[in-house]
Amino acid sequence: MLTDDLNRIRRIRLALLAGALALFALLYAPQPVLPQFAESFALAPGTTALLVSAGTLGLAVAAIPLGTLSEVFGRRRIMVCSLLLAEAIGLLLPFVAHFPLLVALRLVQGAAVAGIAAVAAAYLADETGGRDLGTTMGLYVAGTTIGGMSGRLLGGIAGDFAGWTGGLAAVAALAGICTVAFVLLLPRERHQRRQELRWTPLLTGVRAAATDPALRPPFLVAALGMGSFVAVYNVLGFRLVEPPLSVPPALAALAFLAYAAGTVTSALAGRLADRWGRRPVLLAGLGTAVLGLLLMLGGNLVVILTGLVVFTGGFFAAHSVASGWVGLLASPSARGQASAMYQLAYYGGSSVGGVLGGVAYAAWGWAGMTAVLGCWLVLAAVPVLRSRRARTVGAAAPEPEAQVASES
């Protein structure tokens, strides 16, 4: 029986690694070929950026509904159907020559991938029972970093040779392989207790997740951490190509390789959280991100890129721990909604933080933006420091320290 459980956990880890890779490759597929879109459709850069924004907007809007429906129809079914739909749209996009339709399809595709993003943490909490959850969630987040980086690089390289259609087709092919692996490997649920399709208790679960004080720390980490992360990557390209650095744009784009640091630290943070507890590892991740911001204040290109790697690694370490923590802190009847709320905070923070970070950069330069982002990360850390409290009566998950002790 023990061997069967271990094999099942391995399958879950591999499946969610593949699913995360497909999710983020598809979500950001248009980003590296936006210049080709602008040239092909004779559009301004800001307009072509709608292809990326539509995907993340769709994900943010659909996260809570799909997380809620997973309580009724089953988490595996929602995740599989969602990824299959997203991949089908990914294969269709290279053949669409009407820009408004492309944007509409991207909105639907973003909503589809929300079926994995919003449900994965709840599925893991149910099916692993908290056993090595940090390690498993760390591998899932590692898959998101690999997908985000590989999709951008593959799409950009293919786009240079075959235009935007070739770039999107290449990413869809990569995601298709990962989607097949995900469907074949992901085990059916054994432990989820499904609810009837009654809106009152489902909406009660949404309200419970939104108002639970224990969930506020990871939600704030998601919103403020992701807002800081997107702001840095949105603005960094401008800083690199402008004097005094004057880096060629093609080389500046290689800054996305810093995502590799997130692949390593997200998996490592998960294992450390299982051993030492989630709170100290999460705080260490946020502190590392602040250190990276401070390093990027330097004027030397090598120091700036080193800071970017440190910042990226710290952010993904914190995100890995916070996202897995949600599944343990939420009550079993609202895990799907709590996971969806985390995704809403994460992508809502991305949208708002990216804009505000750009505004801060335009008004006060890189140093001023760094001060703003540093304050956000400190604000995210404060409720984590103050989160020592027991779960309410009736909640299934023990208080985090007790959970860690039982796992060790």
Image (cartoon, rainbow, N blue to C red):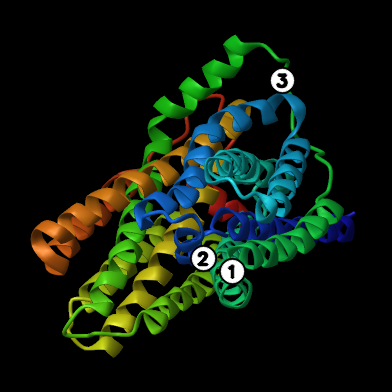
Assess whether mark 1 and mark 2 are in contact (beta carbons under 8 angstroms). yes
Q: Label 2: which residue?
A: 33
Q: Estimate the x, y position of residue 226 in percent, counting from the top left.
A: 38, 53
Question: What is the spatial separation of the Cα atoms under label 3 and label 1, in whole angstroms?
Answer: 47 Å
Q: What element carries label 2?
A: helix
User: What amino acid is found at the position of numbered circle 2 in the picture?
Assistant: Val
Q: Nearer the viewer, residue 173 or 11?
A: 173
Q: Estimate the x, y position of residue 337 in percent, counting from the top left.
A: 56, 30
Q: Is mark 1 on a helix, strand or loop?
A: helix
User: What amino acid is found at the position of numbered circle 3 in the picture?
Assistant: Gln
Q: Label 1: which residue?
A: 163
Q: Label 3: which residue?
A: 195
Which dot marks residue 60? none
Which image quarter: residue 70? top right
Q: Estimate the x, y position of residue 222 in percent, counting from the top left.
A: 40, 48
**Circle 2 residues within 10 Å: few <14, some 14–19, many ≥20:** many
Question: Counting residues from the N terminus, which is met first, the one under dot 2 or under dot 3?
Answer: 2
Establish if 35 lies above or below 331. below
Establish if 202 lies above or below 238. above
Q: What element carries label 3?
A: loop
Question: What is the spatial separation of the Cα atoms under label 2 and label 1, in whole angstroms?
Answer: 7 Å
- Residue at left offset 42%, top offset 59%: 318
* Side (left or right) of 127 relative to 262: right
Assess whether mark 1 and mark 3 are in contact (beta carbons under 8 angstroms). no
Q: Nearer the viewer, mark 2 or mark 1?
A: 1
Question: What is the spatial separation of the Cα atoms under label 2 and label 3, in whole angstroms?
Answer: 43 Å
User: What amino acid is found at the position of numbered circle 1 in the picture?
Assistant: Gly
Q: Estimate the x, y position of residue 21 in percent, counting from the top left.
A: 65, 61
Q: Work out whether residue 75 can be spotted.
A: yes
* Side (left or right) of 201 relative to 235: right
Q: In which quarter of the image is the C terminus?
A: bottom right
